[in-house]
Image (spheres, rainbow, N blue to C red):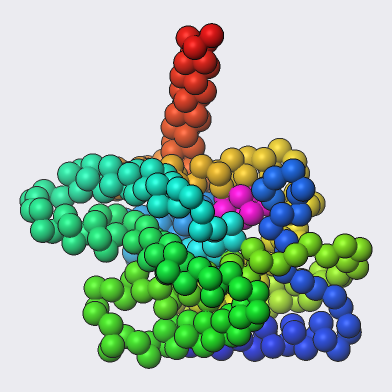
């Protein structure tokens, strides 16, 4: 509750600051690029995917060296710093969501089929005793690997959007829905729904992330403002960044608290802060992170296999805690990314060959 309350207070102070000093600010428009999709959202997904890997690296180090407090508290700090990741994925998934022809076909081909293959193979690799009932339970709840819960969660939001699309896409209701969803999400974070929902459902409850989903839809409905004045918010974001880093250090280094994935304000702050920084990023760096974002499904589904296999090796054996951490991060992002490159090149060669045959 302390972190949640701090975030709400900071959001209130930030809103007051913008209002008092008449600083114009609006949500980033999803189609600022007139020729296509705004790639900064893919860069954000790239940051989120790297953040998910960082969260799991902390568990990996904790598994081998729970008594090495200085290292574990450092990895915990980086893990807590990355807790914007899942909310940001939910938010960016909603921005471009539209109910159109082939809605479920695309979800089946691009999400459910890869998830099913990864779940079946992962179940066979990770567990020793197999039962159909256990697999179905793990599959439906996303429990084959810890991060797989995201897929059943996302599917619920796709169903929710499909049923209530007319209401959700009506700009007249967007602000009211966003306001209501904030309090629903806050109530869920505070555990008010825990006794009402089955225990196994808690990790994939849409109430944990409904605000981020509706915020993504709200951003998707926003219109590009012509001649919009530039908002100088760097002082505000800089001040809040220092406050957040201070409390992250306290919670991670002193109290050793492992944050939840679905705190409300921190992911929104990170989203807006990074959005302001993105234009100033090195072009090559932003392209690399964008590639990770556009291929995040590969990394999301394959990274758990990499980190699972790495549990056969002490991370310190890769050159100590520092180099072990860096190498673990590179392998868990790099191997799935390399596979994504190979698959994409294979598809490109196949399409070229198929096109030549037709000619």
Residue drawn where x is 64% and y is 54% of the image: 41
- The answer to whether residue 282 is above or below residue 147 is above
Residue 142 placement (x, y as % from top left) = 29, 59
Q: Nearer the viewer, residue 64 or 242?
A: 242
Q: Which part of the image, by quadrant, shows the C terminus?
A: top right
Give percent across and percent down for residue 90.
50, 63
Q: Indicate yes or no whether the magenta region holds residue 260.
A: no
Residue at image coords 59%, 57%: 96
Relative image position of residue 326 (x, y in whole percent): 51, 46
Dominant SS of magenta comes to helix
Task: Kindly identify the residue that appears in the image at 69 percent across and 50 percent down.
Answer: 38
Q: Is residue 51 above or below residue 123?
A: below
Magenta segment: 40-48
Identity of the residue drawn at 42% across and 69% down: 163
Q: Is 46 in the magenta?
A: yes
Q: Is residue 280 left or right of residue 199?
A: right
Q: Quadrant of residue 60?
A: bottom left
For the question of whether residue 82 can be seen, the reply is: no
Residue 105: in sight, yes or no? Answer: yes
């Amino acid at each position: 509750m302390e972190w949640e309350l701090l975030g709400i207070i900071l959001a209130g102070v930030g809103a007051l600051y913008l209002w008092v000093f008449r600083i114009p600010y609006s949500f980033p428009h999803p189609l600022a690029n007139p020729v296509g999709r705004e790639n900064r959202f893919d860069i954000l997904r790239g940051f989120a995917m790297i953040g998910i890997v960082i969260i799991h690296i902390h568990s990996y180090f904790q598994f081998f060296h729970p008594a090495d407090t200085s290292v574990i508290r450092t990895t915990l700090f980086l893990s807590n710093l990355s807790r914007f990741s899942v909310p940001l994925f939910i938010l960016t998934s909603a921005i471009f969501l539209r109910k159109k022809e082939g809605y479920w076909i695309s979800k089946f081909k691009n999400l459910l089929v890869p998830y099913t293959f990864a779940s079946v193979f992962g179940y066979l690799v990770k567990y020793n005793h197999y039962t159909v009932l256990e697999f179905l339970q793990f599959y439906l709840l996303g429990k084959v690997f810890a991060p797989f819960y995201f897929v059943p969660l996302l599917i619920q939001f796709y169903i929710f959007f499909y049923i209530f699309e007319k209401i959700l896409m009506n700009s007249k209701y967007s602000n009211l829905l966003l306001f209501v969803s904030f309090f629903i999400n806050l109530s869920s974070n505070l555990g008010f729904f825990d006794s009402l929902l089955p225990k196994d459902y808690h990790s994939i409850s849409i109430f944990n992330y409904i605000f981020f989903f509706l915020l993504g839809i709200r951003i998707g409905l926003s219109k590009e403002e012509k001649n919009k004045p530039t908002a100088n918010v760097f002082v505000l974001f800089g001040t809040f960044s220092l406050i957040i880093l201070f409390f992250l250090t306290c919670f991670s280094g002193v109290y050793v608290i492992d944050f939840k994935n679905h705190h409300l304000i921190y992911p929104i702050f990170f989203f807006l802060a990074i959005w302001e920084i993105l234009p100033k990023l090195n072009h090559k760096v932003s392209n690399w992170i964008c590639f990770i974002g556009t291929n995040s499904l590969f990394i999301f589904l394959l990274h758990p296999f990499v980190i699972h296999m790495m549990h056969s090796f002490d991370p310190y054996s890769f050159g100590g805690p520092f180099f072990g951490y860096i190498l673990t991060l590179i392998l868990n992002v790099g191997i799935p990314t390399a596979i994504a490159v190979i698959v994409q090149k294979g598809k490109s060669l196949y399409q070229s060959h198929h096109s030549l045959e037709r000619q």
